[in-house]
Image (cartoon, rainbow, N blue to C red):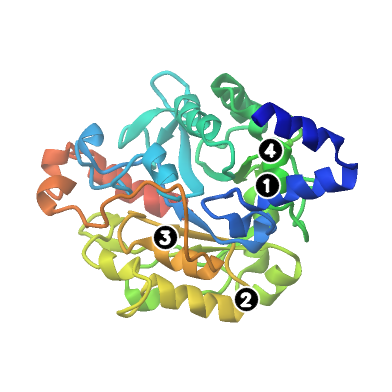
Amino acid sequence: MLVRSLQMLLLLPAALRLAFAQNSNSSTACNNSPDLCQRAYNNITHLGAHDSPFVRDASTGYSVSGNQYYNTTVQLAAGVRLLSAQVQTNSTNGQLSVCHTSCSLLNVGTLRSWLQEVNTWLVANPNEVVTILLVNGASASATSLAAEYEAAGITNSAYTPTRSSAIEQWPTLQQLINNGTRLLNFVATLTDNAGAPYLMNEFDYIFENSYQNTAPTDFSCTANRPDSVANNTSGALGAGMMPLMNHFLYANETLFEMPNTTYLATTNAPSGGVGNLGDAATQCTSEYGRVPTFVLVDFFNVGPAISAVDRLNGVTAPVGRTGVSTAVASASTSGADIMSAGWGKGVVMLCLTIWAIGGGI
């Protein structure tokens, strides 16, 4: 029966075959919804996991520097489509590694091994478009970063932009999928990407609001980075830059800052108390005259943050997602006891490094 159907399809005029293909595409979900397939990449809100590889679980001794409760693979399966990570040089072996602020503080392995994890998920999920944002703490060159991508076998999926500055019209998700360019890669920062044009300097294409927030009333939609558009949100939007909305809180401790979990259920909520994600996203949408392209959160499962993003995207019946608990981990499982989490000397190092770099982590 299937063979006969295919034979009949081949007899149809070309125009009818094209219509058939388009109808088939429309019934296939892209990023967990058929409604997103024909929308431009920059006209969708992508949920982001801030510091995606840094997990607060047994694998890290429940480190209090962890920003997520679930690993990158689970994040992707649950609907996260933007993964941010910090790249540092491991002073022990000189390798580019995924480390939180310093490899002596929290080192979860080489950059290539993390990229391999992402690639494994991409290959298994051929109708999904994923974005990576690397914070280049190592000041690595495009050539050095590209070597990690090549070793991970992920370069074949990488999208190369049509220009080296903000793009007014990005491809649709379906176009990215059809072209086999389902991985978009931004680096903060990269002065020259001649050796790897698929590695895009973040601040040529994206602007961010402030990330350094410690109180629910601190959240603002105003452009903060790059410096060229600081406090000039209309200028950033007019230049075609995509808005990235940082929405996470830090808790101030005696010597350092750590992700705030005390207020997390409200911070990531679709509605409710002061500083909730849903209201903040609505405010930014109003100020921008469009939805933010990216929303970056800690502990993505709480809230759940995906609810606010679905509302922004007009998605009411997502498909293909893995369900995860929306609970905030208890103190007994989150490593609240700093010394038992193996911090010791790392506490002072984190404090000094944060104030020294003054950049997004």
Amino acid type for the residue under numbered disc 1:
Ser
Q: Secondary structure at mark 1?
A: helix
- Mark 1 against mark 4, which lies toward the viewer? 1
Question: Disc number at residue 306?
Answer: 3
For marks 3 and 2 on the same chain, the one whose residue lies earlier in the sequence: 2
Circle 1 residue: 24
For marks 1 and 3 on the same chain, the one whose residue lies earlier in the sequence: 1
Circle 4 residue: 181
Work out how far the residue at label 3 is from the one at label 2, CA to CA, in angstroms: 21 Å
Q: Secondary structure at mark 2?
A: helix
Q: Position of residue 95 (x, y in %)?
A: 47, 22
For marks 2 and 1 on the same chain, the one whose residue lies earlier in the sequence: 1
Circle 2 residue: 288
Q: Quick check: 15 above or below 105? A: below
Work out how far the residue at label 1 is from the one at label 4, CA to CA, in angstroms: 20 Å
Amino acid type for the residue under numbered disc 4:
Thr
Q: Position of residue 29 (x, y in %)?
A: 57, 50
Residue at left offset 33%, top offset 80%: 274
Q: Quick check: 146 above or below 241? A: above
- The answer to whether the residue labelled 1 contacts the one labelled 3, judged by CB atoms less than 8 Å apart, is no
Residue at left offset 65%, top offset 30%: 2
